[in-house]
Amino acid sequence: MSDIPYEVKVVARSEAERNELLGAAPTLSLRDVLASGGYRLVEDVPEELFDLPWERFAPDCVVEGRTESGAGPSEAVPDRQAEHPAELRDGQAVRFAYWEHIEQVASLLRNGLPVLVVTEKLVVTHLWTEMTSSADLRPVLLEDPQGAAAAAVEDPPAGQEVAVLSGMVDPLRAEAGVRADRLTQLRGLLERHKDGDVIVLPHLDLLCGGQDLGRHAEARELVELLYEYPDRLVLAFADTSLPLPHVLAERFSVRVSISGVPPTVPVPHRPDAPRVPLGVALVTADEANCFENFSPRDFHKHVAGLNPVRMRQAMRYAHQVHSEPRPEGGRPSVRDLRGTLRSFKAKQSTMFEVPDVTLADIGGYDDVKREIEQALAIVTGARQLPAELESVRGELVPRGFILHGKPGTGKTLFAKAIANIMDATIQVVSGPEVLNMYVGESERMVREVFAAGRRSAPSVIVFDEFDAIASARSNRQDGGTRVGNSVVAQILTEMDGFRPEVQMLVIGTTNRIDMIDAALQRPSRFRSIHIELPDLAARRQILRHHAGRYHVKIEDELLELISGATDLWNGDELRSLMRDAAIEENLHRRPPTALQMGKLVGRIQHERRQRKAEQ
């Protein structure tokens, strides 16, 4: 029987009942625990599970009317009272999800303060429209490179004029020439600025041409131009993955960062109204009714890293995939929705994949599996924390693991199994791939990897050969060491910027844990897990597992002998043994007898001795 706990979602009537449920005797059956109070299951549980002991379950228990983050009933609309919208456009979704940011920026603009907003480009058009409208200012928009910025606006504010300078930009013109033309346009906007106007720069990051001002004369001119008119009200946008020169960012009084989606959203223009769960406000009635037992409270953790526009695209895609009648009847389940959302997020980038490896597919290593399951229980919410610990939840959630051990022990397999437990996508990055000879490029690669991971949350980022980019920093002045120091510093910065509500883990795999920088091995950053060579019991399980995979029929007595004869073998060598046995049986008609298996074991032992001699 699998040791992986079964997840059950339970609603309690009060905080006291919730604490009683979480503290129930582990030997009681699920049926007895539920009967001890007024508990309600959110999702159906197979009948055979009701007689299992309570210790076999990972309960997600909330008080009725309480949000996932622990807010009281007065702060959120209970699911049964909230209503899904009949239809929802992307602009409305951005307005709901980011209304607090929109009001914050609008207030700053009304007070004459220039603002820089760092967010994804997909939402920029919707944001500047809402921000300038809420501030009751006339937006003067710098034209995009194709001269079509105004045409991209969805639902321009009533009674407002969008001022756009005329003139098409030749798409074949060199990049520097395009930026020069746009700077000329910007100078005209700054010179003709009037009271009540706000100059909108939707792509400030592209206009400056990167972080290195020394590369582009136009970038230096942009800085001089904006500082030449310090009293002009400017609203600018930059993408989260594109760095800005510090001197340019300093031109703005306030910098606002917007990413992902919150668990609950406010009602626009109604500050006293209860907050609405994201799974209600940004999911239409048809989409919610499409999936059986759809839970708005649990919806957020599967889309937390997506911006509102991308989230709406994902839900429309999931609804379209599952709206067709099913041959077996009934509605698709919430698990179907999770799988479709995970597949959608993986397709956003060729770097991400949907893993199919589970802990059950990895033979042996029971202690390692138990440690991983206990850590992930907090990340996924499978083990509900007491109410008094919700405020420090972010400190209890591990940010990453360093899986270290000899080659072939299954470190990458464990990483994929972790992603599977989290219903997450996975991105495997080879450490040397991050390094680049040009100044700043390695750090940019690290930023892009983390940014992609946040957008695809829940996600797992795996740095294979972690020691190549995270080796201990030194005071040596050679270029290679300086690059390594900068990459480690960038990883530390990204790790410290994690948001607790965005489920994202970073896993480093290495054969040389002694080379990893000490700052990364702090308990608040990476949790170290040693993957040792499999012992006798683990080798037996690994061999039996791969024998089943390759359909090798082998007697238990012979399997026991092989397990004893393969001391100090890693999991990859054990897999190779069963693979060779399958080839011999199916292609050469040599069944896995004791003699035949002895020959295969001897061949691999000979190859091991040869490798050792060469080293």
Image (cartoon, grey):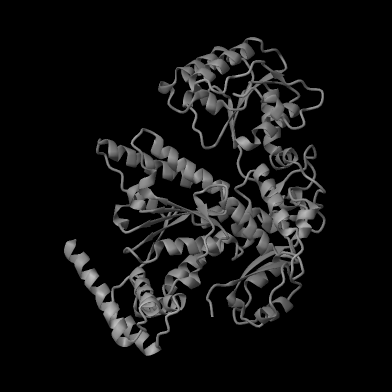
Instruction: Give the image location of residue 267, x and y in percent.
Output: 77, 42
Q: Is residue 260 above or below residue 294?
A: above
Instruction: Give the image location of residue 137, x and y in percent.
Output: 73, 22
* Residue occupying the far front of the picture: 588
Instruction: Give the image location of residue 297, x and y in percent.
Output: 70, 57
Task: Pick whichever, 491 or 386, lies toward us.
Answer: 491
Q: Is residue 246 left or right of residue 584?
A: right
Instruction: Give the image location of residue 70, x and y in percent.
Output: 67, 56
Q: Is residue 51 visible?
A: yes
Q: Residue at x 48, y 65 (%)?
A: 372
Q: Is residue 79 visible?
A: no
Task: Pick whichever, 558 or 358, lies toward us.
Answer: 558
Q: Is residue 75 left or right of residue 209?
A: right
Q: Is residue 30 above or below residue 236?
A: below
Task: Pick whichever, 457 or 521, lies toward us.
Answer: 457
Q: Is residue 229 above or below residue 299?
A: above
Task: Pick whichever, 141 or 248, lies toward us.
Answer: 141
Q: Residue at x 71, y 38 (%)?
A: 99
Instruction: Give the quarter of the image for residue 555.
Output: bottom left
